[in-house]
């Protein structure tokens, strides 16, 4: 409010002063005389003031015309002027619009339109960094690798865009399959930007594929230094790389270095089964069987595995089967489980102690039926002298049983016959684990589920009975050959006589339970029911009694 009043007062004062000045000039007797050649002009005070203003206006206009002429001359000469700045601003505006449209087309996947806009922006803009980047990426999207490579190389000239140019050339070499050149470019890019995660992963992948395990360990150290890996994960991956380097040195004849690397790999990750087995063999090669056994026991406690058992058996290669069974108890007792039970059963089979092997395997054929378990059961039956039909029955079940734990990739579920650092299917690094693959069981196209019914019946494993006194008659009945028992069995119904009736009333098995050295096999005895008319029906009847 006060400011408004002040402005009004100032305006009135200025108007009053102007009016007083005009009145003073009008009443003044003074005059201005101008003589030009033979002409003389007399101007009053007001006329003189107006003439002065006109002269000043003409002088200002003259100066502007002179400045315009000078600017035109400088523009023609190529100097920076207002005119050149005007045209430059217009060109820059149109270039930025073309650059924006090019990046939008690139994001939309329109490679042809992006290249067109990039060429337009390249003509209008002086800053080539963005236009080179747009042109390189647009050409790559379009599929013009030669043009993309040319502009990626142009990016190398600018310090700010050199890293991007190296990465672009690296990706081109990877797509072209030139892994050696790609690995060198990735190493150069990582030198420029050591903490760049994507470059670290790319370089490590290329080093793993090319077998540069030592270089991969250096790259892994950079990843750890950048804080991208927890300590335990770093030790695990470093152990995997050290193990791969050890295997490469062993293949190259550098046995001492291979042994040192294997021991280092086990130290970094005691639960890595291949590292433990190789470290144990390294200690055995150096004559330290006790250290080898200690390594395998610690690894077995963490992760039981058949490879550990195999390495443990190599510690004493010349021992007898019975001695091996006793020595293995120190290993197996460290972690009792399915693997320990199967290993113990296999050792007892090797020692020809088949009843003990049956007790060791227990009920794994029911709780964890795998091909290995079924094969062990077949070996036990064969060792105990069972019929071929029984052995074939277990082997038939092994055909349709799950494979059991395998080296399975966590990413793609691909099954490997042995441990490798890189998955053969998805190329994942350190993705293998010892586990049962996903269950893919179901009716097969070939009907293999019927094999147990066709090839023979299975005898359900039974506990070892308590020994009881047996007379000579019982022992002779147990030892009676199967062929004689079949002769004593009743004939078909149409030929049945008194002998047949007596055979029908005969008990299933006269041998007392537990008599003899072998378990009772009365479950498979054909005397329990009348003999079917043909061999196929007899087998089917026996199979039904066994629960199949």
Image (tube, rainbow, N blue to C red):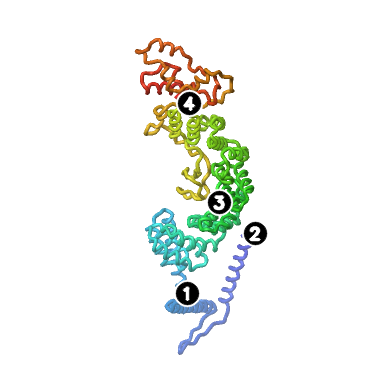
- Above or below, 64 against 176 in this view is below
- The residue carrying mark 1 is 81
- The residue carrying mark 4 is 459
- The residue carrying mark 3 is 240
Tag in front: 2 or 1: 1
Q: Quadrant of residue 148?
A: bottom left
Specify the label residue 95 is tagged with: none
Dot 2 falls on a residue whose secondary structure is helix
Q: State the image coordinates of residue 491 (x, y, percent, origin top left).
A: 38, 15
Rate crowding at label 1 as few (under 14), some (14 to 19) or many (20 or more) other CA atoms within 10 Å: some
Q: State the image coordinates of residue 5 (x, y, percent, origin top left).
A: 63, 60
What whole-number distance in Å separates the C-alpha atoms at marks 4 and 3?
A: 45 Å
Q: State the image coordinates of residue 477 (x, y, percent, origin top left).
A: 49, 19
- The residue carrying mark 2 is 2
Q: For the residues labelled 2 and 1, say whether their Cβ atoms are less than 8 Å apart.
A: no
Tag in front: 4 or 3: 4
Query: Can the viewer see residue 426 in this picture?
Result: yes
Dot 4 falls on a residue whose secondary structure is loop
Q: What residue lies at 55% left-to-right and 18% top-to-bottom?
A: 471
What whole-number distance in Å separates the C-alpha atoms at marks 2 and 1?
A: 46 Å
């Amino acid at each position: 409010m006060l400011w408004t009043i002040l402005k009004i007062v100032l305006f009135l004062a200025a108007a009053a002063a102007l009016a007083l000045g005009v009145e003073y000039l009008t009443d003044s007797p003074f005059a201005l005389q101008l003589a030009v050649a033979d002409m003389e002009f007399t101007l009053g005070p007001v006329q003189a003031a107006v003439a002065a203003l006109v002269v000043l206006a003409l002088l200002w206009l003259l100066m502007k015309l002179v400045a315009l002429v000078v600017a035109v001359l400088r523009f023609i000469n190529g100097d920076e002027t207002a005119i050149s700045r005007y045209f430059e601003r217009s060109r820059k505006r149109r270039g930025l619009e073309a650059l924006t449209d090019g990046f939008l087309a690139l994001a939309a996947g329109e490679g042809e339109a992006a290249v067109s806009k990039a060429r337009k922006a390249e003509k209008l803009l002086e800053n080539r960094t963005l236009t080179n980047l747009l042109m390189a990426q647009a050409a790559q999207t379009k599929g013009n690798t030669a043009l993309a490579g040319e502009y990626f190389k142009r990016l190398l000239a600018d310090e700010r865009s050199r890293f991007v140019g190296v990465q672009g050339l690296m990706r081109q070499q990877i797509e072209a399959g030139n892994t050696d050149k790609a690995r060198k470019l990735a190493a150069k890019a990582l030198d420029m930007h050591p903490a760049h995660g994507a470059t670290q992963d790319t370089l490590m992948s290329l080093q793993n594929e090319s077998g540069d395990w030592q270089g991969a360990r250096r790259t892994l150290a950079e990843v750890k230094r950048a804080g991208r890996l927890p300590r335990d994960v770093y030790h695990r991956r470093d152990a995997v790389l050290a193990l791969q380097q050890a295997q490469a040195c062993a293949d190259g004849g550098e046995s001492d270095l291979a042994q040192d690397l294997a021991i280092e790999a086990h130290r970094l990750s005691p639960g890595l089964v291949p590292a433990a087995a190789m470290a144990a063999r390294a200690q055995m090669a150096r004559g330290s069987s006790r250290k080898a056994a200690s390594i395998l026991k610690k690894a077995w406690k963490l992760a039981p595995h058949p490879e550990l058992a195999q390495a443990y058996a190599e510690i004493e290669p010349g021992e007898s089967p019975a001695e091996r069974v006793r020595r293995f108890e120190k290993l197996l007792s460290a972690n009792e489980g399915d693997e320990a039970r199967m290993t113990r059963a296999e050792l007892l089979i090797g020692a020809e102690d088949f009843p003990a092997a049956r007790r060791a395997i227990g009920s794994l054929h029911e709780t964890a039926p795998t091909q290995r378990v079924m094969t062990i059961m077949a070996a036990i039956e064969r060792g105990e002298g069972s019929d071929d039909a029984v052995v074939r029955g277990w082997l038939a079940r092994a055909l349709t049983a799950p494979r059991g734990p395998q080296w399975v990739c966590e990413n793609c579920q691909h099954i490997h016959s042995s441990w490798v650092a890189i998955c053969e299917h998805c190329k994942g690094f350190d993705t293998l684990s010892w586990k049962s693959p996903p269950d893919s069981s179901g009716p097969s196209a070939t009907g293999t589920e019927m094999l147990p019914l066709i090839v023979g019946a299975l005898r359900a494993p039974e506990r070892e009975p308590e020994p009881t006194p047996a007379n000579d008659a019982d022992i002779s009945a147990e030892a009676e050959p199967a062929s004689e028992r079949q002769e004593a069995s009743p004939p078909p119904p149409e030929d049945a006589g008194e002998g047949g009736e007596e055979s029908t009333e005969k008990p299933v098995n006269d041998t007392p339970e537990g008599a003899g050295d072998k378990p009772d096999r009365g479950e498979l005895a054909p005397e329990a029911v009348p003999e079917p008319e043909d061999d196929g029906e007899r087998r089917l009847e026996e199979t039904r009694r066994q629960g199949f």
